[in-house]
Image: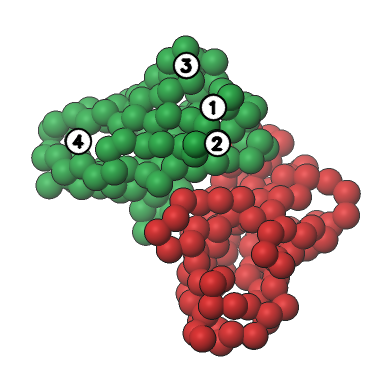
């Protein structure tokens, strides 16, 4: 069974630009969660999608948004990039909604904002 | 706000040494607890989890963790580490009053010297 696939692996953007990250979950998984990982803050929950609906949201500004398609694939968008958005963005899929279903992570997208 | 503390940020051990990584959380209600591991160059993966029942849970690769409710702790242990256990270890907690969002510790980097 293929794992969680995130594209692209690396991105370099400048301040003010916007970026879209993509995540393909494990086949059959309907929940997709997004996390921001930085050395100082660790893993910070961004949002969770299940059946194309955002079910949960972390404490990030509205510049961070996402969506999920009917095939469970998900995209995350960050607009008006700031230097502080530089991080590893992780996507995780799970069978069920909510934090109790084991998460299967992708390798992440490394975003660098200059 | 709920939080998860991992006391050891960096641990260095020799092979065959015993390991204990601390994890404490701040929430008085029902919790579900997880340890995830990230080996070098690989994605995060579930090591073990506790939902209910026997507070001593066993995971993959000889790891175990003990839930001590009175101490709000879920420490990870392994009697004899191997070089291949070199990785980053994350504790995560899902509290029933937290809208099913996982709260993560900052992680502990373990280096095992051969």
Q: Chain of mark 4?
A: A
Residue designated by label 3: A71
| Chain of the residue that carries numbered disc 2 in the rendered image | A
Q: Which residue is mark 4?
A: A81
Asked if the residues shown at circle 1 and circle 2 are in contact, with their CB atoms under 8 angstroms apart, the answer is: yes
The chain containing the residue under callout 1 comes to: A
Tell me the residue at 82%/61% (across/down).
B56
Which residue lies under the disc numbered 1? A27
Instruction: Kindly give the residue lying farthest to the right in the view shown.
Output: B53
Q: Position of residue A103 (x, y in %)?
A: 58, 40
Question: Would residue A111 be seen by someone viewing this image from the given angle?
Answer: yes
Marks 4 and 3, how far apart at CA: 28 Å
Alpha-carbon neighbours of circle 3 within 10 Å: few (<14), some, or many (≥20)? some
Between disc 2 and disc 3, whose residue precedes?
2
On screen, residue A86 versus residue B101, left or right, reads: left
The one of A1 and A51 positioned closer to us in this rendering: A1
Which residue shows up at 14% across the image and 40% down it? A13
Query: Is residue A52 shown above or below A97?
Result: above
Packing grade of label 2 (10 A; few <14, some 14-19, many >=20) is few
Front disc: 1 or 4 = 1
* Vertical arrangement, residue B110 with respect to residue A80, above or below: below
């Amino acid at each position: 069974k293929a794992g969680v696939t995130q594209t692209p692996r690396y991105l370099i953007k400048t301040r003010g630009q916007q970026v879209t990250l993509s995540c393909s979950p494990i086949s059959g998984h309907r929940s997709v969660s997004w996390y921001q990982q930085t050395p100082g803050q660790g893993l910070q929950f961004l949002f969770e999608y299940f059946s194309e609906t955002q079910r949960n949201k972390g404490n990030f500004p509205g510049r961070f948004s996402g969506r999920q398609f009917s095939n469970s694939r998900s995209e995350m968008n960050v607009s008006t990039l700031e230097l502080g958005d530089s991080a590893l963005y992780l996507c995780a899929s799970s069978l069920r909604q909510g934090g109790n279903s084991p998460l299967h992570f992708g390798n992440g997208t490394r975003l660098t904002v200059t | 706000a709920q939080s998860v503390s991992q006391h050891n940020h960096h641990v260095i051990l020799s092979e065959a040494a015993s390991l204990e990584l601390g994890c404490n959380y701040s929430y008085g209600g029902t919790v579900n607890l997880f340890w995830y591991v990230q080996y070098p160059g690989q994605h995060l993966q579930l090591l073990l989890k506790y939902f209910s029942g026997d507070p001593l849970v066993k995971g993959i690769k000889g790891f175990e963790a003990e839930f001590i409710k009175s101490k709000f702790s879920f420490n990870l242990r392994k009697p004899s580490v191997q070089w291949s256990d070199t990785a980053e270890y994350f504790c995560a907690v899902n509290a029933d009053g937290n809208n099913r969002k996982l709260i993560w510790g900052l992680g502990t980097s373990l280096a095992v010297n051969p």
